[in-house]
Image: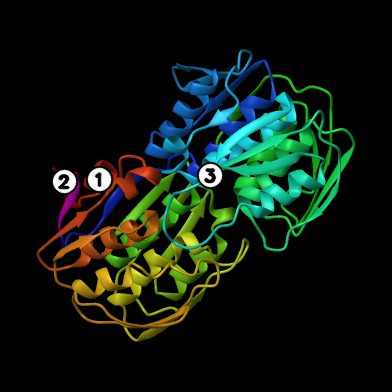
């Protein structure tokens, strides 16, 4: 099993290019199932979840061909309408093939998902939505089996804001008969990116970026070209790492307009930030000030940045309160940060962090994707060597993170 060994104490300095967003790439790859023509995607990130989704689509019969800076997807000859357990168990996003398969082929058999153990993310929102659109659904032997001659437009109100639920039903509704209205829909930038791609394919989607999305179904979608948006969570992770180490970095190919809450909190912590086009520059010339956070659906503070800011707060001046409202198990990094000397108390969904002057290196274990990023940040500022185990979590959602950090001056290497 691979690990990361980090020698702490180096300030990050330099320029880093931000990769395409994993959470935009995965649903957009699934959108290729909606048409028989080529979908050409640029800026696809090179990471484990994207590779897993590619394998799943290829198993179904989608032809995937890298072509220089782009990747061509063609679903003209899909012959297997199933997402098996061995594919879905490592990546919950595989549920996103459900809507497109039922919409275009009238049937899908998708394993109930696995993925990060950060809390329950029920698929019943996907199922109820498809049932409202006329699909017959049975759960059998751990699989969702859905059938429909043609989906019908419907008015669907989500009990909870669900990003993948919104994306799945948007794709399903694109080929449905009639108008579908999604209420209490997710407003995330990744949902907007999917809508942009669907419109390029001929779908009639409006209202994305608001909590009410309207989709007027069409008989057929066609091929298109689309560039995957920059990864706002990777952007935030590098900015927090630079702030924690007292560094100065420039992000390129980034988008500041989808990072408002993260940039505001970094400024509150004492960072100087300047934005120019697709470049974000951060400089931190003092010890950070502790910042309070409360996670909530976009446009509020993202749950996917909570762990990284907790790592920053462990070495900040003062105390901070972090409230996690999205996932009930998303404090599993706390006990690992404590191994490095962090002073954190947890009660329910609230953590109180008292900043200390210095963390000390130790062996720690990643428990989920974003928790592993927080441990890397903590390792960058800790005295001595920190070894992060189970970094397959990290590889699911970050593109060559140790190479990028090394280029910024971090002493970090991958070991077996």
Which residue is denoted by mark 2 in the rendering?
Answer: 413
The residue nearer to you, when weighing 272 against 259, is: 259
The residue nearer to you, when weighing 226 against 203, is: 203
Which residue is denoted by mark 1 in the rendering?
Answer: 402
Horizontal relation, residue 208 to residue 53: left or right: right
Q: Residues within 10 Å of mark 3 (few under 14, many from 20)?
A: few
Q: Would you place residue 29 above or below residue 60 in this image?
A: below
Tell me the element at label 2.
strand
Query: Which is closer to the viewer, label 2 or label 3?
Result: 3
- Whether residue 177 is visible to the viewer of this picture, yes or no, is yes
Answer with the quarter of the image where residue 130 lies: top right
Rendered residue at 86%/46% (across/down) = 154
Marks 2 and 3, how far apart at CA: 40 Å
In the image, the segment drawn in magenta is 1-7
Query: Which is closer to the viewer, label 3 or label 1?
Result: 3
Q: Would you place residue 361 above or below residue 117 in this image?
A: below
Instruction: Identify the residue at the far left of this view.
Output: 384
Which quarter of the rendering shows the C terminus? Answer: top left
Rendered residue at 21%/80% (across/down) = 357
Marks 3 and 1, how far apart at CA: 37 Å
Which residue is denoted by mark 3 in the rendering?
Answer: 142
Instruction: Identify the residue at the far front of this view.
Output: 141
Residue 265 at x, y percent in the picture: 48, 71
The residue nearer to you, when weighing 60 against 252, is: 60
Q: Main secondary structure of the magenta part?
A: strand
* Dot placed on the residue nearer the N-terminal end, 1 or 2: 1
């Amino acid at each position: 099993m691979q690990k990361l060994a980090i020698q702490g104490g180096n300030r990050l300095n330099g320029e880093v290019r931000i990769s395409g967003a994993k959470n935009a790439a995965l649903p957009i790859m699934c959108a290729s199932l909606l048409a028989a023509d080529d979908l050409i995607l640029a800026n696809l990130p090179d990471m484990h979840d994207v590779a897993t989704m590619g394998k799943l689509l290829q198993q179904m019969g989608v032809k995937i061909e890298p072509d220089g800076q782009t990747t061509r997807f063609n679903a003209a000859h899909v012959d297997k309408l199933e997402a098996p357990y061995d594919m879905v168990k490592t990546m919950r996003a595989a549920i996103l093939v459900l809507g497109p398969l039922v919409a275009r082929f009238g049937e899908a058999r998708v394993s109930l998902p696995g993925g990060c153990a950060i809390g329950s993310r029920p698929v019943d929102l996907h199922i109820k939505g498809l049932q409202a659109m006329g699909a017959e659904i049975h759960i059998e032997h751990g699989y969702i089996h859905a059938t429909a001659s043609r989906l019908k437009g419907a008015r669907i109100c989500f009990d909870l804001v669900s990003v993948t639920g919104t994306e799945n039903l948007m794709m399903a509704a694109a080929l449905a008969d009639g108008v579908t209205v999604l209420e209490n829909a997710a407003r995330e930038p990744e949902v907007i990116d999917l809508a942009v791609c669907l419109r390029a394919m001929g779908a009639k989607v409006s209202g994305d970026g608001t909590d009410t999305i309207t989709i007027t179904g069409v008989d057929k979608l066609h091929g298109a070209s689309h560039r995957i948006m920059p990864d706002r969570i990777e952007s935030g992770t590098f900015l927090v790492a630079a702030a924690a180490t007292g560094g100065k970095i420039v992000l390129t190919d980034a988008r500041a307009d989808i990072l408002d809450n993260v940039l505001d909190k970094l400024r509150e912590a004492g960072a100087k930030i300047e934005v120019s086009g697709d470049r974000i520059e951060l400089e931190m010339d003092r010890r950070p000030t502790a910042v309070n956070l409360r996670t909530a659906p976009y446009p509020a503070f993202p749950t996917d940045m909570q762990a990284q800011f907790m790592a920053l707060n462990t070495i900040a001046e003062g105390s901070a309160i972090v409230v996690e409202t999205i996932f009930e198990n998303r404090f599993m990094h706390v006990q690992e940060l404590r191994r490095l000397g962090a002073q954190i108390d947890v009660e329910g969904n609230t953590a109180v962090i008292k900043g200390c002057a210095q963390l000390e290196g130790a062996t720690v274990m990643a428990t989920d994707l974003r928790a592993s990023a927080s441990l890397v940040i903590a390792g960058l500022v800790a005295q001595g060597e920190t070894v992060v185990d189970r970094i397959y979590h990290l590889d699911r959602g970050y593109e060559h993170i140790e190479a990028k950090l090394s280029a910024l001056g971090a002493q970090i290497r991958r070991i077996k």
